[in-house]
Image (spheres, helix red, strand yellow):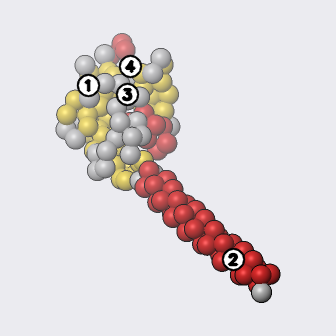
Amino acid sequence: MKKQWIVFLLGISMISLAACTDTKTTKENQVSQSTSTSLVVEQKATIILQEDGKELSSKTIEVTEGQSVYDALKKSFAIEDQDGFITKIDGKEQDPAANKYWMYTINGQEASKGAKDTLLKANDKIVFNLSKV
């Protein structure tokens, strides 16, 4: 009779421990997965290229929240830069002799920072215009 009680108690103990551990681990994994999934949210933004106010091309692209204007532009167009300043986009190059430079606006407002330091948000409209300063 004594052996039966020991076997019975050991069986109950093992079932209890197994049940507690699996539930906690499963819940932790679910929370971890849902948290990591929500960190990457893709959104759309529009980039328009102009020369002297006339549209050359336009692309609506997928961007990740917190992505810089520079990275989004580089992902979508062929660009060149010098010391962080964009000098050429899709074959259209700045012309210092004619005082023509690439400038950009976001949602109709002149950019206050460089393209590498400006972060995108959902539905942003970025216009790069090659024109006289």
Secondary structure of residue under mark 4: loop
In space, the residues marked 3 and 2 are separated at their CA atoms by 65 Å
Compare marks 1 and 4 and give the one earlier in the sequence.
4
Q: Position of residue 60 (x, y in %)?
A: 37, 52
Left or right: residue 8 versus residue 101 is right
> At 26% from the left edge and 25% from the top edge, which residue is drawn?
112
Which disc is residue 95 wearing?
4
Q: How packed is label 3: few (under 14 Cα within 10 Å), some, or many (20 or more)?
A: few
What's the amino acid at mark 1?
Answer: Ser
**Quarter-of-image position of residue 103:** top left
The local crowd at label 4, few if under 14, some if 14 to 19, many if 20 or more residues have their Cα within 10 Å, is some
Q: Is residue 103 left or right of residue 11?
A: left
Mark 3 lies on a secondary structure that is: loop
Q: Quadrant of the N terminus?
A: bottom right
Image disc number at residue 73: none
Mark 3 vs mark 2, foreground winner is 2
In this view of the protein, which residue sits in the foreground, 1 or 126? 1
> In what element is the residue under mark 1?
loop
Identify the residue position indicated by label 2 in the image: 9
Residue 19 % position (x, y): 60, 72
Disc 4/disc 2 C-alpha distance (Å): 86 Å
Mark nearer the N terminus (3 vs 2): 2
Residue furthest to the front: 2
Type of amino acid under label 4: Asp
